Amino acid sequence: MKARLNAYTAAPETMKAVAAIEPIIAASGLEASLIELVKIRASQINGCAYCIHMHTKDARAHGETEERIYLLDAWRESPLYSARERAALAWTEALTLISQTHAPDDVYEELRQHFNDTETANLTSLIGVINTWNRIAISLRYQHPVKAKAA
């Protein structure tokens, strides 16, 4: 698969604007590990290999364990995630699949048990932004780095 175009070259100001929210979210008070889990989970749902590669690497750099990264797709069946992380992951799934879920009240109410107003707004923005990045990377066929050829 070949990349279709480089959005950073084609629309540098637009890409700069999309990227500008990243440091704001990073400084928002949301845990770095939670931010990466949300980015990975949304990217898994969307099937964005580029973003999964990037954010699993970032998660490891922030101290995330291999086990939690590997089990993220099955977080409901694993005791490795806190109640706060579970609420965030459920909200991530609901918003990533919003055309199907319409952000259900029960998922929102559970989220609100663990996140205050500011955190909820920041988490919701984070989910929106990672979905934007997934759509850019998937549609323009961004390729993650490859160290070795597939067997």
Image (cartoon, grey):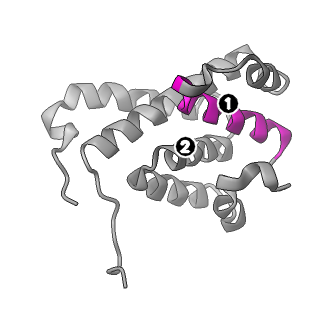
Dominant secondary structure of the residues highlighted in magenta in the image: helix
Taking the magenta stretch, the answer to whether it contains residue 87 is yes
Q: Residues within 10 Å of mark 2 (few under 14, many from 20)?
A: many
Q: Is residue 67 above or below residue 134?
A: below
Span shown in magenta = 82-99
Residue in the foreground of this view, choosing between 99 and 21: 99
Mark 2: secondary structure? helix
Q: Which residue is mark 1?
A: 91
Q: Residue at x 62, y 55 (%)?
A: 62
Residue 15 located left or right of residue 77 = left
Q: Position of residue 119 (x, y in %)?
A: 69, 23
| Quarter in which the N terminus is drawn | bottom left
Q: Residue at x 62, y 36 (%)?
A: 93
Q: Residue at x 30, y 58 (%)?
A: 143
Q: Is residue 148 above or below residue 40?
A: below
**What type is the residue that disc 2 sits on?**
Lys
Q: Nearer the viewer, mark 1 or mark 2?
A: 1
Rendered image quadrant of residue 11: top left
Residue in the foreground of this view, choosing between 72 and 106: 106
